Amino acid sequence: MSDYHTPSNKRNLTDQELKEFFKKMIEIRLFEDEGVRLYKQGAVGGFYHSYKGQEAIAVASAFVFGQKTGDFLQTYRCHGLYLALNGSPQAGFAELLGKREGCSGGIGGSMHLSLPNMPLGEGIVCGHAALAAGMAHAKNHLGNKSPQVVCFLGDGAVAQGLIYEALNIAKLSKAPAIYVIENNRYGMGTAVDRAISFHPLGKKLAQLYDLSSYYLKGCDLFHLIDSFTDVLNDSRKTSMPIIVEVDTYRYQGHSISDPGNYRDREEIECYIKKNDCIAIIRKEMEQRKIDIETCEKEVRETIRIALDKAMEGKDPDEFDMKKGVLDEV
Ligand SMILES: Cc1ncc(C[n+]2csc(CCOP(=O)(O)OP(=O)(O)O)c2C)c(N)n1
């Protein structure tokens, strides 16, 4: 589609910045590859939702909205944002493996990686949309407008009633939350066109509440960085909720046990061939003659060491398991 947002400025990334972004995107992809491998071996309990294909969105938003200063809420598809926010790959793997050294103490698992500024991977579709409104409202109330509240949702959230309640209250209370809808074209096995009666999702939702909206190209890190910068400036200027819809695609099934019978292999391959976010940044690096091989080697080593160390972790004991559940503990 050609109606993506046109950024007002183009940021010139340095070679060093480009390298760091590339490495982070590769880190997410390799993490997912290893995670899926562990899941298929039976080493990871619960469900596993891969972020493969969507890496540029997490990396660009962490960079623009503040890796350390923003507050982020994400769905169960949370591994990419966790790593983009500089979550340790070792603590991430340990969490997948249910080890007490995991980022959520080994009791959250794949769907619930967490960091101080990413308190959850939300399992309830759209469950955190109202939390984001509340968090943004609280910041207003406390006179602390600097940390940005960013709430990631899937396209499936737009079919949930809660999004309407959350946006209504966010608008009424002038809560400057940024809602980022990662439209990866499917909610489980249902294509978004079959699940939601209006399009474009972000624009129509925003019209309902008279809010700003942006439609972004999810495979293009450069476009995302420049566009998210416009979103951030808009949020600071208006101090109102904003809706961002990002056009993206998930490469793997909804979860790893999804056989994917609702789409052809050809559709996936065709998207990857034209729009892979890592291939796009790689091309720019090639043009600038940046040493891609060394970057990849370094990330592979980081992932290997992180996984080896995570495997050595301990299982949570009874005390760990009850923490936060029973008052007396
Ligand atoms: C309130 C609620 N309804 C249904 C489910 C079951 N469910 C889990 S994931 C999912 C699909 C969500 O798709 P989407 O929001 O597009 O996110 P994606 O998985 O594509 O990232 C559904 C229906 C749920 N977890 N919560």
Image (cartoon, helix red, strand yellow):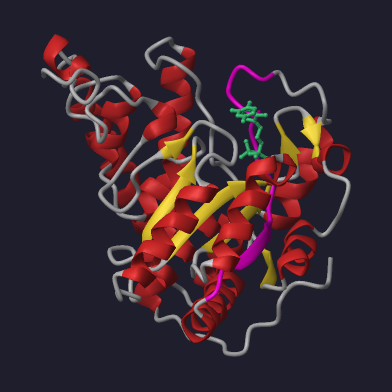
User: Which of the 4 image quarters holds residue 34?
Assistant: top left
Looking at the rendering, the quadrant in which ligand 1 lies is top right
217 lies left or right of 174: right
User: Which of the 4 image quarters holds residue 311?
Assistant: top left
The residue depicted at 82 percent of the width and 30 percent of the height is: 263
The residue depicted at 81 percent of the width and 73 percent of the height is: 3
In the rendered image, residue 132, in percent from the top left (x then y), is placed at 47, 54
Q: Quadrant of the N terminus?
A: bottom right
Q: Is residue 304 above or below residue 10?
A: above
Q: Is residue 38 visible?
A: yes
In the rendered image, residue 156, in percent from the top left (x then y), is placed at 70, 40
281 lies left or right of 111: right
Magenta span covers which residues? 240-258
Q: Residue furthest bottom?
A: 9
**Is residue 256 in the magenta section?**
yes
Q: Nearer the viewer, residue 192 or 295?
A: 192
Q: Is residue 239 above or below residue 274?
A: below
**Is residue 245 in the magenta section?**
yes
Magenta: predominant secondary structure element?
Answer: loop
The residue depicted at 53 percent of the width and 58 percent of the height is: 56
Q: Quadrant of the C terminus?
A: top left
In the rendered image, residue 184, in percent from the top left (x then y), is placed at 69, 46
In the rendered image, residue 53, in percent from the top left (x then y), is placed at 60, 46
Q: Is residue 54 visible?
A: no
Q: Nearer the viewer, residue 308 or 106?
A: 106
Q: Nearer the viewer, residue 238 or 305?
A: 238
279 lies left or right of 217: left
Total number of numbered labels? 0
Q: Is residue 254 above or below residue 47?
A: below
The residue depicted at 41 percent of the width and 55 percent of the height is: 72
